[in-house]
Image (cartoon, rainbow, N blue to C red):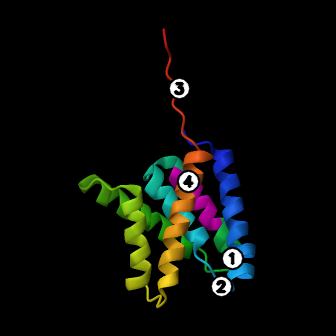
């Protein structure tokens, strides 16, 4: 089971890093780390009910905070979860392979013309996976007799 409070704390840390640290240190006007966090949740835990609820809540919060049109980010998240569900039912998708494909997709299909975006995206996916493994660890307890 996902530890929800720890996941919310990881989201807050990534949100602050994306909004305060990255623009101040590297001079990025806008960054994509918070959006990548949402996709990393899907790649890490699949399209489960708790991931969909938490991701939709995070998306609605980001839409309100960034003052973007309601439904634009949350619908993107839900469509990505639906696509992952269909793709994972046909193929075995490993999380780092999915992260590499999504990072290259940002560069090739969405028109970002800088390879630094791909490097930032893959580094953000890797950081999210490490945080998920270390902080939001899913522990299964076994009853021993």
Report the front residue among 55 and 140: 140
Q: Secondary structure at mark 3?
A: loop
Q: Residue at x 31, y 59 (%)?
A: 86
In the image, which is nearer the foreground, mark 3 or mark 4? Answer: 4
Under circle 2, the secondary element is loop
Q: Which mark is residue 141?
A: 3
Q: Earlier in the sequence, mark 2 or mark 4?
A: 2
Find the residue positioned furthest to the left.
Answer: 90
Q: What main secondary structure does the magenta stretch of the protein show?
A: helix
Tell me residue 69's x, y (percent): 61, 80
Which label belongs to residue 22?
1
Which image quadrant for residue 22?
bottom right
- Residue 28's label in the rendered image is 2
Tell me residue 56's x, y (percent): 57, 60
Residues at discs 1 and 2 in contact (Cβ within 8 Å): yes
Mark closest to the chain's N terminus, 4 or 1: 1
The answer to whether marks 1 and 3 mark residues whose Cβ atoms lie closer than 8 Å is no
* 61, 1: nearer the viewer: 1
> In the rendered structure, which segment of residues is drawn in magenta?
51-60
Residue for badge 4 = 130
| Quarter of image, res 62 | bottom right
């Amino acid at each position: 089971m996902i530890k929800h409070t720890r996941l919310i704390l990881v989201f807050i840390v990534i949100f602050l890093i994306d909004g305060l640290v990255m623009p101040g240190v590297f001079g990025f006007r806008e960054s994509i780390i918070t959006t990548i966090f949402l996709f990393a949740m899907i790649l890490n835990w699949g399209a489960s009910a708790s991931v969909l609820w938490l991701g939709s809540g995070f998306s609605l919060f980001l839409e309100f905070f960034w003052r973007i049109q309601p439904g634009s980010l949350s619908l993107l998240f839900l469509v990505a979860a639906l696509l992952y569900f269909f793709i994972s039912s046909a193929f075995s998708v490993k999380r780092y392979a999915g992260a590499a494909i999504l990072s290259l997709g940002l560069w090739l299909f969405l028109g970002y013309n800088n390879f630094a975006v791909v490097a930032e995206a893959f580094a953000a996916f890797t950081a999210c996976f490490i945080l998920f493994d270390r902080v939001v660890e899913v522990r299964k307890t076994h009853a021993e007799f």
